[in-house]
Image (cartoon, helix red, strand yellow):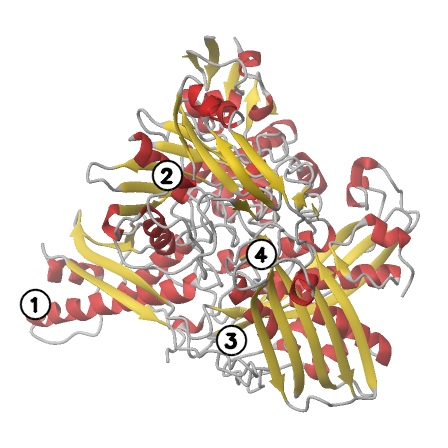
Amino acid sequence: MRLNVTVNGEPRQAEDVWPGESLLYVLRERLGLPGSKNACEQGECGSCTVYLDGTPVCACLVAAGQAEGREVRTVEGLAEGEALDRVQQSFVDAGAVQCGFCTPGLVVAAHDLLARVPEPTDPEIREALAGNLCRCTGYEKILDAVRLAARR
Amino acid sequence: MTKPAEVTRSTTGGIGESPLRPDGALKVRGEFAYSSDLWHEDMVWGVTLRSPHPHARIRSVDLTEALRVPGVHAVLTHQDVPGTNRYGLEHADQPVLAVDLVRYHGEPVALVAADHPETARRAMKRIKVDYEVLTPVSDAEHAVHGDGPRLHRDGNVVRHVPIRRGDQNATAPVVVHGVYEVGMQDQAFLGPESGLAVPAEDGGVDLFVATQWLHVDQRQICYALGLPADKVRLTLAGVGGAFGGREDLSIQVHACLLARHTGKPVKMVYNREESFYGHVHRHPAKLYYEHGATEDGRLVYVRSRIYLDGGAYASSTPAVVANAATLGFGPYNVDNVTMDCWGVYTNNPPCGAMRGFGAVQAGFAYESQMDKLAAALGMDPVEVRVRNAMSEGSTMPTGQVLDSAAPVAELLRLVRDRPMPAERGELDLRAMPGGVSNTTHGEGVVRGVGYAVGVKNICFSEGFDDYSTARLRLEVLGGEPAATIHTAAAEVGQGLVTIEQQIVRTELGIQQVTVHPADTTVGNGGSTSASRQTYVTGGAVKAACEAVREKLLKLAVTRFGEPRANLTPAEIVSVLGTEVIEETVEWRHRPTTALDPETGQGFAHVQYGFAAHRAVVDVDVELGLVKVVELACAQDVGKALNPQAVVGQIHGGSVQGLGLAVMEEIQVTEGKVRNPSFTDYLIPTILDTPPMPVDVLELADPHAPYGLRGVGEPPTISSTPAVVAAIRAATGLALTRVPVRPEHLTLEEPR
């Protein structure tokens, strides 16, 4: 099938999409946007978190066809040119990035949190990010990053 | 011997600072190329058919139906392996593709390449394998002493390490016994096994892969493909975590086989389920301990037997056995020790390296014993540890004298003397055991505090020729001195690339340092494991800087007519002009020796790292749910080359230990893996993880570059026993097995 989807503000088309493919597969393998990560492909780790019509979702759990005609914003669409988004910059500055495989999903999830709750408490940060697994950092510096981003 | 560095340079971002990671911006933008992100014109996808049985004879394999699927480019079996169908880190005992026998659930049997991953998976399901199912050997202790089948030609014992030191018949007035079990933990790195193999016109292959050691992969691939090293070229692709799970091969040979067979670039990416089958795990263990002490709490003797379940193939089991044995008494002074430690073949999933590497299993047991001893003596658990704590000059059970700092008592005091976290305040479900499941508002919730300390060897041991290679190029670019550092050492997330830049900045006094991608066009960098890369590759980078500086200073004599001790960046530009200085240096740490095969005596380890934890937990004793409230750590790191990265390692290691304490286990029944998913294999989320205050000591090791001490593993040792000790304190239960599950807390008899 042919899929029409707006990605990071740009209308895109993907040809010959097999209906069983996920939005994640289409983004990564057909549209050249591998920033959303494929860590579990079953909705447990949050590494593939993207905005779908403004709501954060696990792209691995969205069938490609469900995205037809909708707007997707991925981690690649957060920075303004060379300038990183404040969440991205804070993750780098706070040391919240080690291997970085969880980072795109966490950045999108934290970006969404700060859009909804500009000054989150620690329990609010923990609750908002509880769907994103990280194996390297022990999450302490991720908390630091979100606090830092909230102050910026 | 090296003095701790004195940094008096004009540059910023040298050692002792925490400059930003060079790959950080790419990673937060989603633009860093991990091994699963690679793409090549005309590439096809490879998948692996794996055995559904832990032990079975293969009667026949029929590929006919699979080959008929449109879009399939190749279906391969062991008959298509052109070289030797065997690989392994220490023993080449594992087939690339099974021949006539499968020895574990998930063993690779056949490969398929097709133009879409789903096509490949569907074709794979049409391969017909006729298995004669055999009874699996699933108990490690029985595999050593029982009368079951021999799983490999030389029997079921991969390695036995004995230690005998002091009076083997020593007696003591206070004796505590314990039998402990450790479940099978998974590294659960987030980036799945993956890579891209590209066939080359010269008959060779170029492989882009996530791994921990390019050159040991290369050696094994060459052996299996029957190719010389110059025909098998590896480049490190972006690595999404490792923790030991990428030391053994996964897709490497398979992808190369498919690429050479199809003549096309082949991408392989495991999904999470396959990842659980596709790498080795932490050895499950059964540990028997007897501690004898005086009435004032001084250890007289320790006797131990440890069984480590290595699963179907050897992997790094021999080295894990040596670690569990030599570190198996903990950081305590005791003159009379007896140890027998076995690593064993079974039909369980293969086990090998995971952060902590043998020291984790032993650490849970010996620290549980120290708590038991404290209880038997009516003594404070920290006090009994401090009373027996090793220090610089102490003798290890191997006879090796600790010849640098060993601040065991100080680390314990640091975590003990920290202020306690606040008592529970107003009800917040997120802070409760059971969390927002709303299982308690405080009824039945009891707080407990526990302590532990641990020891880990740093770098490779037992006489291994452990080295790294660094190539450094210095030139003038855009009017500034610029260095390029090239090693084959794998950045897996820990921040080695930052450390390499920092060392060059400090050593050469220049700002601009580029890290060349790691590949096999430069010499061996050794493994990213054993907490060794900052030490060994860091040492190599430093040595390469010294070699470059020597040449530079010689040039400076010509330029200035007199010798100079240091050059400013402007002077470097003036001295170099259009010249390029390039030096390649191999660097080794001090040598170690083998263990005596009868007594386990020897100068086996390069360096020891120590960490201590205090855990505070809230336990819902009625439902058996645990909330870790705080996990404080103190660790000596010799010299913090990058303080932010050091603390990041301590946090990450601590949480992996927490996971083993309360949730992480690959459940294996009669050799079958029952929970290969993140739905059923749980790792800590941000809600499971408490605040983790850290004390970092910097007591320089005079034998190490800059005085540094490996950081990555020590916090993984003491975290688990500290959390379990806290749960014991809250519940009064014996808790001899990790992970502790709700049923252990609600159905066990009090101790």
Query: How much space separates mark 4 and mark 3, taking CA atoms?
Result: 47 Å
Q: Residue at x 84, y 53 (%)?
A: B744
First in sequence, mark 2 or 4: give its number: 2
Chain for mark 1?
B
Q: Is residue B18 left or right of residue B617?
A: left
Which residue is tagged 4? B151
Query: How much space separates mark 2 and mark 1, taking CA atoms?
Result: 62 Å
Chain for mark 3?
B
Give the SS element for disc 1. Answer: helix
What's the amino acid at mark 3?
Leu
What's the amino acid at mark 1?
Arg
Q: In the rendered structure, find residue B80 and report the number of the disc placed on it.
A: 2
First in sequence, mark 4 or 1: give its number: 4
In percent of width and height, residue B34 lies at 42, 39
In percent of width and height, residue B251 lies at 44, 41
Between label 3 and label 2, give the one nearer the viewer.
2
Query: How much space separates mark 3 and mark 2, taking CA atoms?
Result: 55 Å
Cβ atoms at labels 1 and 3 below 8 Å apart: no
What's the amino acid at mark 2?
Asp
Give the SS element for disc 2. Answer: helix
Q: Is residue B443 left or right of residue B282?
A: right
Which residue is tagged 1? B559
Give the SS element for disc 3. Answer: loop
